[in-house]
Image (cartoon, helix red, strand yellow):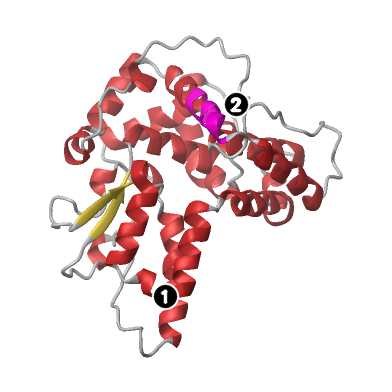
Amino acid sequence: MCMIPKVGSTFWRHVYTAYRKTADKSKTKGGYDISIEYDRGSLRLSNTMLAFVREPYQRLFSGYVDKLFFFRPSFWNTLGRSVVRFNASHTKRSRGGHEITFAELVDYVIYCHENKKNIDSHFKPMSEHCGFCEIDYTYIGKMETFRDDVVYMSDVMGLLNFTTVGENILKNCFHGKSETIYKMGRNVINSTRRAMERSGVSLIEGLRRAWKTWQIRGMISIQFPFPLQANDTKITFERFNELAQRAYKASKPSILHEARDRALRRAYGSLTYDAKVRLMKMFEPEFKMFDYNPMPDFVFGEHRNEDSIDLFS
């Protein structure tokens, strides 16, 4: 399987790790030669070649939310600084990598693509990953049908023959939101707090970004506002996780998509028409390869910024 960043790659990495641990211990069952790679140059071509793709506009937006809007000091200090330097020549403003807007990222991505500049793999078009024109893939799954395709492809790879691997797939694919909230909240308070604060983002701001990220990703309903005040500087992970898990459990599944849809429309509504057309040109091979709509309504439809809830403030 060739994996593309921001197309379920973290999920498959966890599944593959669980498989390797199990297969190495099971001499009678561990006869499957399975490889999950990011670089097509390291792929060992076999009779069964698999890959996953995703709606390109949504993949780009997801990359922004996960790597730049959310607390990612490593990305703020690398990709973020590059975007800041690029936009400084236009805006004449000097800011940190954590303050980049979606429109600024898009302008930078378009510039890199059109001028054949290197860019982080999370923002490189899918058509430039995995050698789709050179390799005859047996099956290409889609994020839009992720659960069904995960079960099918896991079966194809022989992963479901191992109980612990099947449990890992079930846990992360069907019941993984609660654990994701737990891990992300813990990272903000315990793991990345110092790096985050060195970048100019306070603990409360980091937690607020985490909360809004969960809303944008459809984990917590938009009806539950960020529960802390600016002076809650002594908040513990246990308390914050309790608040987040409570909101997650009380969120109605039928409305969880609202925040995601509103954030997506607002993000693309901030782009100029020229930027949208140039993005469409950049993604053109993917529309043809994977049968995606080049002009979805959330990108090219009329957008009025009348939303009273700003998920990116």
273 with respect to 44 (left or right): right
Residue 307 image point, x, y percent: 57, 14
- In this view, the mark in front (1 or 2): 1
250 with respect to 134 (left or right): right
Q: Is residue 9 magenta?
A: no
For mark 1, what is the residue? Answer: 162
Evaluate whether residue 87 shows in this view.
Answer: no
Evaluate whether residue 117 shows in this view.
Answer: yes
For mark 2, what is the residue? Answer: 311
Q: Is residue 259 magenta?
A: yes
Q: Which residues are magenta?
A: 253-262
Q: Amino acid at mark 1?
A: Phe
Of 301 and 112, the residue lying toward us: 301
Which residue is pictured at 53% across the width and 21% down the height? Answer: 92
In this rendering, the count of numbered labels is 2
Toward the bottom, the furthest residue is 27
Residue 235 vertical position relative to residue 300 in the rendered view, above or below: below
Q: Quadrant of the C terminus?
A: top right
Disc 1 secondary structure class: loop
Residue 298: image tag: none
